[in-house]
Image (cartoon, rainbow, N blue to C red):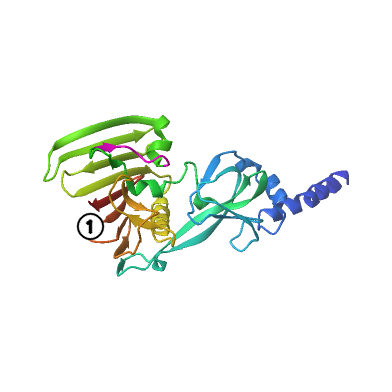
């Protein structure tokens, strides 16, 4: 009789906890107790250019506590197991000519329990990464600068990726490639300890090329980077600037960027402002390669 009572008691106390794993209607603290085997404390960064919704519960329709800005640091406390989808819609970016073999891309991932500024809540793991997001603004500028005495030097802008991460530089070398139509063809290559490689070149005539290699964790990171690039350069406050003492590229001054061409297919995107300026983004294994070509 005592044995039967004891078994019934065990069954009663186990029912509430088994119910928690079936859905997410229960309070988040109960969920943590049920999933302690997934517990971790990784630092994760927001990759969504528009910011990441910080929610009360792990669901796309849950209450938004606040929006965590792009690039902000969070602490991962736990993961759930139920997958959700978020759609990246590339048809929102208008250009004079589109060739969208892929018009959208679905990210499929789980929600995670995180800490942000001493607050606990849920965020979509597919838009959180272990490394800071690529600095799109500085990647669209060349560090080749014209000095007051009409000499060209490689000098990154103060707030550029190259300058901010100069203490993390693993390798830097300048190369000369012979005389071009106008001047000396030169290039500079920088490699950082986090795996990012940046190479800039001038052909000695009228073309500058900047190539950035960015390590990624998942294949879907390629589409997030493409989407972020488009969000940045089509932003209402973003402008195009030409060559001069401030460098060359897309910036905060000059004409507003108007896309003349945009194409997207599996693992490859091409974005163009004009016949002279274009951005090609490709994925090769676990690298995203961004090539920015500009006429000067």
> Which residue is at 47% across, 43% downward?
132
Note whether 162 is above or below 126 in the view shown: above
Query: Residue 216 occupies which quadrant of the picture?
Result: top left
User: What residue range appears in magenta?
Assistant: 152-159
> Which residue is at 42% across, 30% downward?
167
The one nearer the camera, 159 or 69, is 159
Give how far across and how far down residue 35 sits, in percent. 65, 46
Give how far across and how far down residue 249 sits, in percent. 32, 51
The residue at the far front in this view is 149
Note whether 2 is above or below 225 in the view shown: above
Report whether residue 87 is seen: yes
Query: Residue 196 occupies which quadrant of the picture?
Result: top left
The one nearer the camera, 165 or 228, is 165
Give how far across and how far down residue 224 sits, in percent. 43, 54
The one nearer the camera, 285 or 138, is 138
Q: Secondary structure at mark 1?
A: loop
Give how far across and how far down residue 15 sits, in percent. 75, 53
Q: Main secondary structure of the magenta part?
A: loop
Q: How many marks?
A: 1
Q: Is residue 60 left or right of residue 98?
A: right
> Which residue is at 49% across, 57% downward?
108
Query: Residue 75 occupies which quadrant of the picture?
Result: top right
> Which residue is at 61% across, 46% downward?
114
For disc 1, the neighbor class at 10 Å (few under 14, some 14 to 19, many from 20) is: few
Q: Is residue 184 left or right of residue 167?
A: left
Report whether residue 284 is seen: no
Residue annotated with mark 1: 276
The residue at the far bottom in this view is 96
Is 10 magenta? The answer is: no
């Amino acid at each position: 009789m005592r044995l039967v009572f004891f078994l019934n008691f065990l069954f009663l106390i186990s029912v509430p906890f088994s119910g928690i794993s079936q859905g997410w209607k229960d309070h988040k603290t109960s969920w943590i107790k049920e999933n302690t085997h997934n517990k971790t404390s990784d630092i994760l960064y927001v990759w969504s250019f528009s910011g990441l919704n910080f929610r009360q519960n792990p669901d796309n329709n849950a209450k938004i506590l606040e929006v965590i800005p792009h690039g902000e640091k969070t602490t991962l406390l736990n993961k759930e197991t139920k997958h959700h989808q978020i759609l990246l819609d590339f048809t929102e970016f208008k250009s004079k000519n589109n060739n969208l073999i892929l018009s959208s891309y679905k990210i499929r991932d789980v929600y995670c329990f995180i800490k942000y500024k001493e607050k606990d809540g849920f965020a979509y793991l597919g838009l959180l990464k272990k490394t800071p997001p690529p600095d799109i603004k500085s990647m669209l500028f060349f560090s080749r600068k014209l000095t007051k005495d009409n000499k060209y030097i490689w000098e990154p802008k103060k707030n550029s990726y190259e300058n901010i991460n100069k203490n993390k530089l693993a390798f830097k070398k300048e190369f000369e490639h012979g005389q071009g139509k106008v001047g000396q063809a030169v290039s500079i290559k920088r490699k950082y300890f986090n795996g990012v490689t940046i190479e800039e070149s001038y052909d000695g005539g009228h073309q500058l090329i900047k190539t950035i290699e960015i390590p990624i964790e998942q294949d879907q990171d390629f589409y997030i980077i493409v989407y972020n690039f488009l969000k940045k350069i089509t932003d209402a406050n973003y402008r195009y600037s030409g060559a001069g003492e401030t460098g060359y590229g897309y910036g905060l001054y000059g004409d507003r960027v108007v896309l003349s061409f945009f194409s997207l297919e599996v693992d490859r995107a091409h974005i163009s402002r004009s016949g002279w300026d274009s951005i090609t983004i490709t994925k090769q294994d676990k690298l995203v390669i961004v090539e920015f070509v500009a006429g000067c």
